[in-house]
Image (cartoon, grey):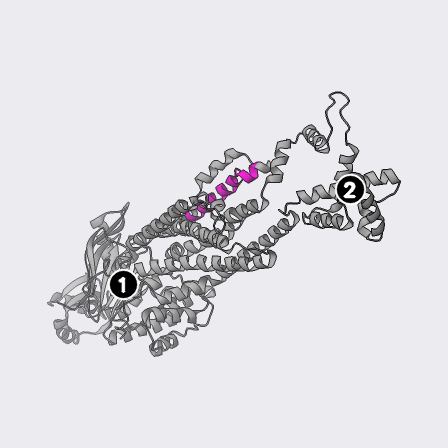
Amino acid sequence: MNDRIIKTEGLTKDYGQGRGIFNIDIEVHKGEVFGFIGTNGSGKTTTIRNMMGFIKPDSGTSVIDRLDSWNCSADIMRNVSYVPGEIAFPSLRTGTEFLKTQAQYLGVTDYRYMNHVIEVLQLDPTANLKRMSKGMKQKTAIVAALMGEKEILVLDEPTTGLDPLMREAFLDLIREEKQKGHTVFMSSHIFEEIEAVCDRVAMIKDGHIIDTLSLHDLRHPAVKNFIIEFDRAADKQQFAGNTEFIIEKDERNSCAVRCNIEQLDTLFRTLKNYKIVNFQEIRRSLQEQFMMAYKEGLTEYGEK
Amino acid sequence: MEKNKKTARFFSKPLMRQTIKSNWILCVAIMMIMVLLANVMNYAMSMMATERSDVDVTEYQESFYTYLGSLATYDTMTKQELSYQDFATGKNDAAYETAFAMMNAKTNMKLSVKGFQDSIDGLSQSGIRIDKYVKQFEYAYALKESEGVFDKKALTPSGMLTITLDMMGVSSEMVEKMSEMDPASMMNQMYYTAMGLLPIFILIVILANSLIADQVDRGSMAYVLSTPTKRSAVAITQLVFIIVVPFLILSVVCATRIGTSFLFYDKVNVAGMLALFGGMYILVEAVCGLCYMGSCLFSQSKKSMAFGGGLTVWFFLASMIGLFGSENMVNTGMGVSELSIFNKLTLVGLYDVNSLSTIGTGSIDFTFAWKLLILVGIAAACYTVGVIKFSKKDLPL
């Protein structure tokens, strides 16, 4: 398959004392928004540095666009934009000056898209680079990365320092990128934003990938869970007594039901015969999914 | 889609522009300091040169003393009061004509007012006031033909001076050396191996660190390397900057110094001065190479600074101490020759100011050549190691 834009195989960088990343396998397909989630110090940035060719892996490979990250990093950059996790600008005076320099590096001559991004993020680039607040620096870095309109975006915690409104604006920009068919790889420790834009998510803990899941599955699960509360306990008993659904939590007036999507219609038809006071779907958020995988990871790799 | 942008492999123009923008103020400031220093130094040296002229006045001195001697004889004989002071007013030439005519008749000499005037004019070239010669003559005249009460040896003013100095604990030998000392060569050595180097050393330590290590440490290098710019292009671009900037600065300093030399001196050894600044440039590049290598080797700004700055400060200090072991300093009594070992412990010692300044004179001493070649070798090796290391190491970006 040729639509694998980013692919790492057995990527390992051992910093000793359990730090580093071990056997990272990630595949990102063309046009996908891929989330990379993990706690602080879990190895997100190290993985990204390996992918960008800034550090040499101890073993394993990272390939972007069929080019090896370490050997051809400069060629990869023709199609990749990067927002570093730590924002430190070169010693230039203003944001405008910095963005202009960046445009020269990238060979960008058409500033329309850049101005569009600046507008969306409500950035004032004429401010002094050194006096910029964290949020403004972050915005400037995002503009610098996005203006190249590259096919692949690698973003290391791009929303740190952004206020909730700006975060929303940023996520809109990511959706725009996705619509253009660009591939986005973003790391974060904020579940909501990953949940909002990503197609697939990899979770990393202590340098190991503990789970990779499709958010499509999370949003549209094949199995749904409902809590149904009946008016009378007798109704509940009758429902629970002769039903094909799996009853999980059984209380006096209410019960939790697990059912496949295909059975949904049957469930509603059955429920029509009872007086229901509460009907609620239990949704599993990414965070819960992560917590679950995290706990599994703990038992798998042990405490540090 | 920007697909046509080529990957920068060896040189990146935007990076060069960025580097110039972020460093030009510092470079210009250092250049101003160096220009100021060089020219003030040049002025001071030219003042020193006019105070102590090398013109040989022995002949005029002898003739002047002859005239003074005959005037003294004439005065005692005729009870008159002719003297240099009186002569210098120029009102009494006739009296001197008669005096000299009489002395000529008596001693078969060829004294004349014109001859006296000539000897005075000649003597004034020495830069020492005529009054002092007169005074010296008075001592010599007073002691004339007197001898010691005990040893019956002739007493002379210079003998008295030597004894006096010995009593004061100052070796007369040293006084002799001091008078032979060449202050110009000492000042040259001080300027080229210590004072003149300090500003540019500070500059290259800061520059070398800020061009690579500091940007890696702070992470701003990420913005360059996340564009189609190879690491080798980054390293080589910064390398070009750090080779060109000292060259430009030293060129300007050299040019202004040659310019002001034409103002202060009649004769200027342009070739010699070019050679001295050329040698200085090679020395600066060798030190710069070490700093640059440190900058490429270490990912932490403080480590790179400690390496480059530490070595440079050591080179500078050792060269300062070594200066007190140089022949000139030892001769003035301000140094000890043992200290010259420090010149072997610093790269500055390979910058042979004395042999370089022979360029443009009759006899050229070529010992500077192999020393400079070593410096060139060090610079080239360090730069190569730096570029290769930077292209291969892990960067925390």
* Residue B269: mark in rendering: none
The quarter holding residue A214 reads bottom left
Q: Residue at x 62, y 49 (%)?
A: B49
Q: Chain of mark 1?
A: A
Q: Residue furthest right?
A: B79
Residue A288 falls inside the magenta stretch: no
From this view, report whether residue A270 is shown above or below residue A40: below
Q: Residue at x 28, y 55 (%)?
A: A55
Q: Position of residue A110 (x, y in %)?
A: 33, 78
- Of the pair B171 and A138, the residue shown nearer to us: B171
Q: Residues within 10 Å of mark 1 (few under 14, many from 20)?
A: many
Q: Residue at x 29, y 61 (%)?
A: B230
- Of the pair B117 and A44, the residue shown nearer to us: B117
Residue B311 falls inside the magenta stretch: yes
- Whole-angstrom CA distance, mark 1 to mark 2, is 89 Å
Q: Which residue is mark 1?
A: A74
Q: Which residue is mark 2?
A: B68
- Of the pair A199 and A133, the residue shown nearer to us: A133
Considering the numbered disc 1 on the image, is that residue within a helix, a strand or a loop?
A: helix
Q: Residues within 10 Å of mark 2 (few under 14, many from 20)?
A: many
Q: Position of residue A32 (x, y in %)?
A: 22, 69
Q: Is residue B219 visible?
A: no
Magenta-colored span? B307-330
Q: Position of residue B368 (x, y in %)?
A: 43, 46
Q: Is residue B52 visible?
A: yes
- Residue type, label 2: Leu
